[in-house]
Amino acid sequence: MTIPAEQLSDPAVRAFVTAVNAGDRAAFAAVLAPGATMADDGSDRDLDQWAEKEIFTVGGHMDVESEQAGGRALTVRYRNDTWGEMRTAWRFTVGDDGKVTRFETGQA
């Protein structure tokens, strides 16, 4: 059972998932605050390089299984052409302006 992106509770997270699933670089950039940061499996990464390698050039897609913390924590079946499908956890920090300032992902 998955939660459709349009039904996710947090507007910034909803926009993030929608942008990823559409492969929409402009929408993805628009949901991020200037200077946003991210980590993958506990290691900080260059967000732009990571997104290009793990999302946009490899057909990244998020199927949300559940949400917690007001919609800012997700359990996701994430897939891309490099790694196939894996169960992942995503945690989002959203600023007062409604933009994602940081996200962290890793194996769930």
Image (tube, helix red, strand yellow):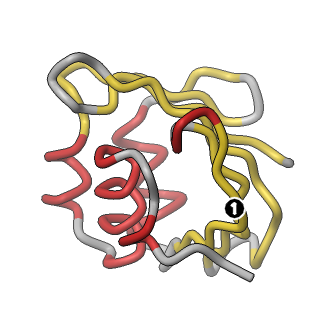
Question: What residue lies at 39% left-to-right and 45% top-to-bottom?
Answer: 10
Q: Quadrant of residue 35?
A: top left
> Where residue 61 sits in the image (x, y, percent)?
53, 74
Q: Is residue 58 left or right of residue 29?
A: right
Q: Position of residue 63 (x, y in %)?
A: 62, 74
Q: Which residue is mark 1?
A: 76
Up the image or down, 40 lies above or below 77; here it is above
Pick the front one: 19 or 67: 67
- Tell me which residue sits at (60%, 28%) in the image: 39
Image location (x, y in percent) of residue 46: 44, 30
Relative image position of residue 65 (x, y in whole percent): 71, 67
Q: Is residue 76 above or below residue 6?
A: above
Q: Is disc 1 placed on a helix, strand or loop?
A: strand
Vertical relation: 39 (above or below) 9: above
Amino acid, disc 1: Val
Q: Nearer the viewer, residue 14 or 7?
A: 7
